[in-house]
Amino acid sequence: MNKTNPKWMDILPTSSDRLSFDQLRNFKQFYGHINTQDMAAAPPSIQRAYRAFRFLYFFAIILIDEERFPPLNRCWDDLRTRFSKLPIFDDAVFIESWIFMDFPITPDGRTVLDEFADYCAANPDALTEFSPFIEAARKSRLGLYQEKISTARTTKYQELFTDRVISTVRSVPDYVPGEVFLGRIFEFGGDRFLLGDPKNWPPAYEQSLFDMVYDRLPSEADSTTAGRYEKFMKLAGPYWMSCVCGSEDDEILRPDHWKSYHSLS
């Protein structure tokens, strides 16, 4: 009698016989972690986005295991060593989404997401399923958002610097009115929502956060403040990870810390 594969094996992006025992174990653990989250009550679009993110995660781990891109391995090893054991980053999304969606793994700026897109382009079924997620992920980035008003189902945010007002599916059940969130707002399947757990500061920190970022924006004469902010937030993931650790003894990384992962290339 043939045994039915467990669900985590059914979504592997490659044949299980091509993977090491450690890879299979990591995939199983990550799949189990994501599925312990209460996704059953989430809109279908959010469930599909997290499913696609699992595939991106699995694909990235293969690249890391095969050491195809040395800067990716340095980034993964460094950020996981620094932050992954801290409770504030236990969602397995905040750190990982920056590494896989935003970090340039090549000198010309390609990301793991770009490699995943190429893989999907060569596999019609994968392209059909994941191209909407890939498009949404490319448009996303970390941002600083001030909560303005919430209902039982929605939260309305205003972004610092851009002043954009964004209405999202409510994904943070408990909040202080006016607090500032650091997170990735994802637009997918007609819904906007925070991908992963956001990090937040009390309302009194709004001006301090604005000043802190403004002082660190890249100096580009031909770019608006909003444009400089967009670029800053796309690449400053490790900086923000160090800022939210919560201890005065923690090292605050430079906003361009990502460049250090290419220094030995």
Image (cartoon, rainbow, N blue to C red):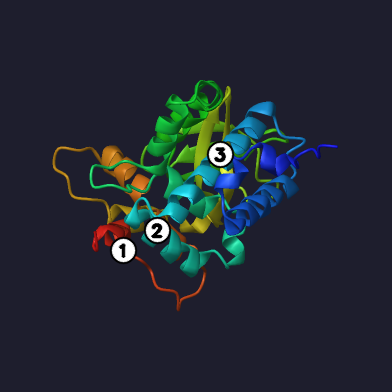
Given residues 240 and 103, the one toward you in this image is 103
Sequence-wise, the earlier of marks 1 and 2 is 2
Task: Single out the mark in the foreground, 2 or 3.
Answer: 3
* SS category of the residue bearing label 3: loop
Mark 2 sits on what residue?
A: 73
At horizontal 43% and vertical 25% (from top left) the residue drawn is: 121
Looking at the image, the residue that sits furthest to the right is 1
Mark 3 sits on what residue?
A: 14
**C-alpha distance separating marks 1 and 2:** 19 Å
Mark 1 sits on what residue?
A: 254
Task: Single out the mark in the foreground, 1 or 2.
Answer: 2
Relative placement, left or right, of 193 versus 29 is: left
Question: What is the x, y in percent for residue 204?
Answer: 50, 58
* SS category of the residue bearing label 1: loop
At horizontal 62% and vertical 52% (from top left) the residue drawn is: 24
Kind of residue indicated by mark 3: Thr
Sequence-wise, the earlier of marks 2 and 3 is 3
Given residues 55 and 98, the one toward you in this image is 55
